[in-house]
Amino acid sequence: MGWFRQRARRWWSGTRPVTGTPEVGVDDADLHERVAELLARELGTVEHRSAAPTPVSPARIASWMTDNQFSYFVDNDGDLGGLWRGRLFYFFLFGAQSEILQVRGQWHRELAIERLEEVLDLCNEWNAERIWPKAYARVRDNGRVHVVAEVATDLEHGATDAQLSQILFCGLSTGSMLFDALDERYPDPAGAAP
């Protein structure tokens, strides 16, 4: 390695000599520690890896709910669900190895079929302006319009507890934001005083 390459390597790795003399024998552990110190100084803190990602399971989701003091239930199909702010949310695992986590919420009200076009416009506008949740409408067998919020994440390589928590909170909070927008657009007539 030439003089210029050694000098550039020392500069990029943070091992450039203060006195002008070359630094010899810097091992990988020292280099890693210096990079961590540089990141801590520049960014404030360095997140240490506390756990390796592990597969997501219904038991981990239920444990997260318990840890966060959320009430939940398991329905007849074995799916986890719960009510948040009066809205029903389910937590599904899809895929060949149950690697896709989906947080799906339902708005607590239904609309008349005559409002389908405006609800579809509202969902399309929401999806065009925001990343989460995916918003869509379904027409039930009884002809009523049902609005759904959905956040899906491929977790093929698993997730740490912190990552899982962030995904679950994202699904719940962004779904609630969509439902709040629907409540504002379509106020409950029974909620107003006569």
Image (cartoon, rainbow, N blue to C red):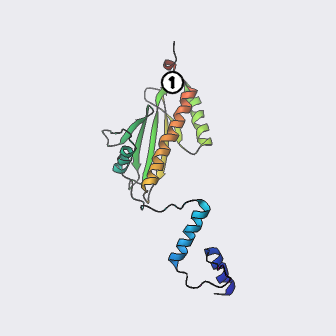
Pick the front one: 49 or 88: 49
Q: What range of the chain is rendered magenta?
A: 15-26
Q: Is residue 153 above or below residue 138?
A: below
Residue located at (58% from left, 27% from top):
185
Pick the front one: 169 or 37: 37
Q: Toward which corner of the image does residue 31 lie, by quadrant?
A: bottom right
Question: Residue 19 in magenta?
Answer: yes
Q: Is residue 57 above or below residue 187?
A: below
Residue 23 location (% of width, % of height): 61, 83
Q: Which SS type dominates the magenta stretch?
A: loop
SS type, badge 1: loop
* Residue 20 horizontal side relative to residue 55, left or right: right
* Residue 120 horizontal side relative to residue 3, left or right: left
Instruction: Spot the residue most to the bottom.
Output: 2
Q: Is residue 97 above or below residue 72?
A: below
Type of amino acid under label 1: Ala
Instruction: Spot the residue most to the left.
Output: 76
Question: Residue 161 in magenta?
Answer: no
Residue located at (55% from left, 81% from top):
26
* Residue 58 horizontal side relative to residue 134, left or right: left
Quadrant of image for the N terminus: bottom right
Residue 167 location (% of width, % of height): 47, 49
Pick the front one: 58 or 18: 18
